[in-house]
Structures are given as structure tokens and as C-alpha cells.
Image (cartoon, rainbow, N blue to C red):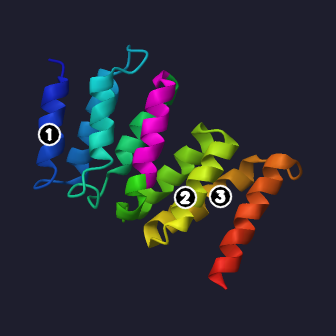
Amino acid sequence: MMTTVNELWLRINALRTNSKRKEVAEIAFALEYLSLTLSPLPDDIFSLYLKALSDTPTLPKRGMESFISGIYNDFDKLTAKQKKSLLETLINNSKLYGDENLRFSVGDMISRKYSIQVALDAFRRMWASGEKNSRLIAQFGANTLSLSLPKDGQERNELRKFEHEIDLEEK
């Protein structure tokens, strides 16, 4: 029997009280499985990802990076509007991402799935917030970008400017 969007909505809400890592991973997997053959990603499924990544009581739970993995795999199915909405959700909630695996997953996804300029703008906003978790995501994301960019060029120069901004503020 296939899981429905409504059932997953209830299970995500239940994470507030019962949040074993295994349960979080099972919900994220079921959500990803639900969208396997669907393109573009339906708004009702997309809204569940946003709920999971913005629900304050569930964000500190271990295993929440499983939702990033699912949306990462479905990223090409997102509409332009959904991609923008996802990025805003990640930026606006980054201060709440206390789990290291979740922070790394967010920084990695932004750096790999968005254009260099969009990713850098997101990391700048996170850094400017002054919030510890947001800044950790921004630093990790910039490091990930650094690994994929050519040693020279406009994009590398933009990354260097951001890294310089970080260095100036840390001193």
C-alpha cells in the first residue's frame, strides 16, 4: 500500500514527539518514493519538504538531513518558483539547523544545485545574519564551491571576495 501525502503530513507532525533517526529517514524516503514518477514535483509533496525544513520543533532532531537528500535527488523536478522558495526556506531557517549533518547537507546542496552567483548570494545572506549555524553553513558551502570552481575566472574571484569578507569579520 502506497503512503499518501496526508499520511506523511501526519508523520512529520508526529516527529515533534517521536523522532528517532530511523523514523525521520523512513518519512524522508517515503516522501521521495512518492515523487519518483512525478515531474514537475507536485506542490503538495513540495510543501511537505518545506514543512520538514522549517518546522521549529522538528529541526533539531537527528536525521533531518534525510529530507535534504530527498529534495537533492528531486531537484531537477522542481519548478523555478519551487527552487526559489526552497532556497528562501533554507536561508530563513538556517539558524535553526543545529545538527552538523543537516548543516553540511544544506551547504552542499546549495553549492551544487544552484548557480554560483545564487549560491554565493545565499551564503552571504547567511553569513550576514550573524547566526552561528547560518555562518557554519555559509563557510561549508563556500568550501564546497571552492572545490568545483576553476582556479581562475570571474566565479573564482567572486568566491575569493566572499572568503575575504569572512576573514575580515573573523579577525
Horizontal arrangement in the rendering, residue 4 relative to residue 94 (left or right)? left
Extreme bottom residue here?
171
Quarter of the picture holding the C terminus: bottom right
Magenta segment main secondary structure? helix
Q: Residues within 10 Å of mark 2 (few under 14, many from 20)?
A: some
Query: What residue sits right under mark 2 in the picture?
Result: 125
User: Which amino acid does the dot numbered 2 rest on?
Assistant: Arg
At 46% from the left edge and 25% from the top edge, which residue is drawn?
78
Residue 85 in magenta?
A: yes
Q: Give the Cα distance between marks 3 and 2.
A: 13 Å
Q: Where is residue 164 in the image (x, y as percent from the top left)?
A: 74, 70
Which amino acid lies under the numbered mark 1 shown in the image of this protein? Arg
Query: Between residues 132 and 80, which one lies in front from this camera angle?
Result: 80
Q: Is residue 36 visible in the rendered structure shown here?
A: yes
Across and down, in percent, residue 19 comes to 18, 54
Disc 3: which residue? 142
**Residue 74 in view of the camera:** no
Residue 117, horizontal then vertical, whole percent:
68, 45
Secondary structure of residue under mark 3: helix
Magenta residues, start to end: 77-91
Asked whether 34 or 120 is in front, the reply is 120
Kind of residue at disc 3: Ala
Q: In this view, does 111 lie above or below 96?
A: above
Q: Residues within 10 Å of mark 1 (few under 14, many from 20)?
A: some
Label 1 vs label 3: CA separation? Answer: 34 Å
Circle 1 residue: 11
Tag 1, which secondary structure? Answer: helix
The residues tagged by marks 1 and 2 sit, at their Cα atoms, a distance apart of 32 Å
